[in-house]
Image: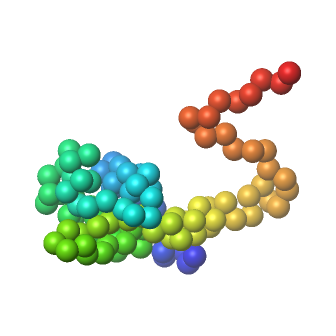
Amino acid sequence: MKNKAVIDALSALANEHRLAVFRLLVQAGPEGQPAGAIAEALDLPASSLSFHLAHLNRAGLITQSRDGRSLIYAADFTAMSGLVGFLTENCCGGASCAPVVAPTQKKRKAS
């Protein structure tokens, strides 16, 4: 991933509403969600949601497709993986890293 694409993606995610939209679409999986369902789930007005979706789309983080009269938005998992890969490239200077524990996971106590 090139630096400009990384900066665009991180800039797009550096907003409370866009981050919430992106996380919702990641949870939805490859099937995505219609714009109306996203607006309802996040309690966003349609005009605001449209602005945020366009920003995420320009940054290459989501895709848009049409299903009849509905616009379906989905996270671009390839772009997401590329972004995470860029951020973690050369992690720990090539040395073996300690496993990362997500905030929702609990560390196990040694027996």
Q: Foreground: 77 or 18? A: 77
Q: Position of residue 103 (x, y in %)?
A: 58, 36
Q: Quadrant of the C terminus?
A: top right
Is residue 32 something one can see in this rendering? yes
Measured as percent of width and height from the top left, residue 47 is found at: 13, 60
Number of marks in picture? 0
Q: Residue at x 23, y 61 (%)?
A: 35
The x, y position of residue 31, in whole percent, is 39, 64
Q: Is residue 101 left or right of residue 5?
A: right
Image quadrant assignment for residue 72: bottom left
Is residue 50 shown left or right of residue 108? Answer: left
Residue 49 horizontal/vertical position (percent): 21, 58
Q: Residue at x 25, y 73 (%)?
A: 67
Camera sees residue 19: no
Tell me: residue 74, above or below residue 22: below
**What colour scheme governs how the chains and residues are painted in the rendered image of this protein?**
rainbow
At horizontal 51% and vertical 70% (from top left) the residue drawn is 79
Q: Quadrant of residue 98?
A: top right
- Quadrant (top left/top right/bottom left/bottom right) for the N terminus: bottom right
The quarter holding residue 93 reads bottom right
**Would residue 82 appear left or right of 12 to someone viewing this image?**
right
